[in-house]
Image (cartoon, grey):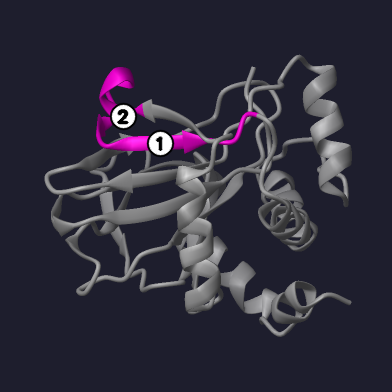
Amino acid sequence: MTALETSLDRLDWTDIGSQLDAEGYAVLPGLLDAELARSLARQADAPHARRVSLASGGLGRGDLYYFDAGLPPLLEQWRTALYRRLAVHANRWNERLDVRARYPDELEDFLQRNRDAGQTRAQSHLSRLGVEDYMALHQRNEGLLVFPMQVVALLSEPGDGFQGGEFVMTEQRPRMQSRPLVAPLGFGDVAIIATAERPFHGSKGYYRVNLKHAVSRVRNGVRVGLELFFYNAP
């Protein structure tokens, strides 16, 4: 068993599932140590990282860095290991929403379903936000085969590395005002969040609620973050 698998096995996945069910997100404090977080942040400068301006898509201000040729090996191993633990929770969400489809146990099997459906565009990326940069509220749920959870991580240090740049979410329930959420991420913290929709238990049973996420304006320094996805877009 790798050190990565061991660190994930130490987590209480029953409790994490309960947090996801209750709030649509769960924070895993300090999952990445400082050396690993800084190493991942430097991947934005790697030759194979494709830079895309947030402004070009109307998503804010700052830059995203995509890995079109494939994720760095460590990130790929991490994504595979996380998927194994999240698939059971994703299947529970589908069951509650009366969705017949079920997610396979292994990430590669789900990605093969993506490819068979014509979904081949990589989604995972790093973000680099400088002073006055921000990421607007958004969600990524393109295609017929979407995994209902994704991972975000903070790869720079609040306070010393940057100020501002809080990770925020909104949750929209039918016929109700949006509910704001703030996930207090520290350096090396990881959060599992709903990609777009999750089940919510109301007085008449489960129904869908819609979530979006954003990063508030950076007031000082540079904020580097990671968004890791378990599916490809069309």
Instruction: Give the class, few, some or many, for how many residues have Cα within 10 Å of label 1's Cα (few <14, many ≥20).
Output: many
Name the residue at 78% across, 73% down. 5
In the rendered image, which quarter contains the C terminus? Answer: top right
**Quadrant position of residue 74:** bottom right
Residue 146 colored in magenta in the image:
no
Question: What's the mark number on residue 54?
Answer: 2
Instruction: Name the amino acid, label 1.
Output: Leu
How much space separates mark 1 and mark 2, taking CA atoms? 7 Å
> Is 115 displayed left or right of 157 in the figure?
right
| Depth check, front residue: 204 or 80 | 80
* Residues marked 1 and 2 touching at CB (< 8 Å): yes
Vertical arrangement, residue 113 with respect to residue 137, above or below: above
Q: Position of residue 213 (x, y in %)?
A: 36, 45
Q: Earlier in the sequence, mark 1 or mark 2?
A: 2
Q: Position of residue 92 (x, y in %)?
A: 73, 54
Please state the extent of the stretch shown in magenta in the rendering: 53-68
User: Which residue is tagged 1?
Assistant: 64
Q: Position of residue 125 (x, y in %)?
A: 51, 41
Residue furthest out toward the front:
47
Instruction: Name the amino acid, label 2.
Output: Leu
Residue 29 shows in the view? no
Vertical arrangement, residue 102 with respect to residue 152, above or below: above
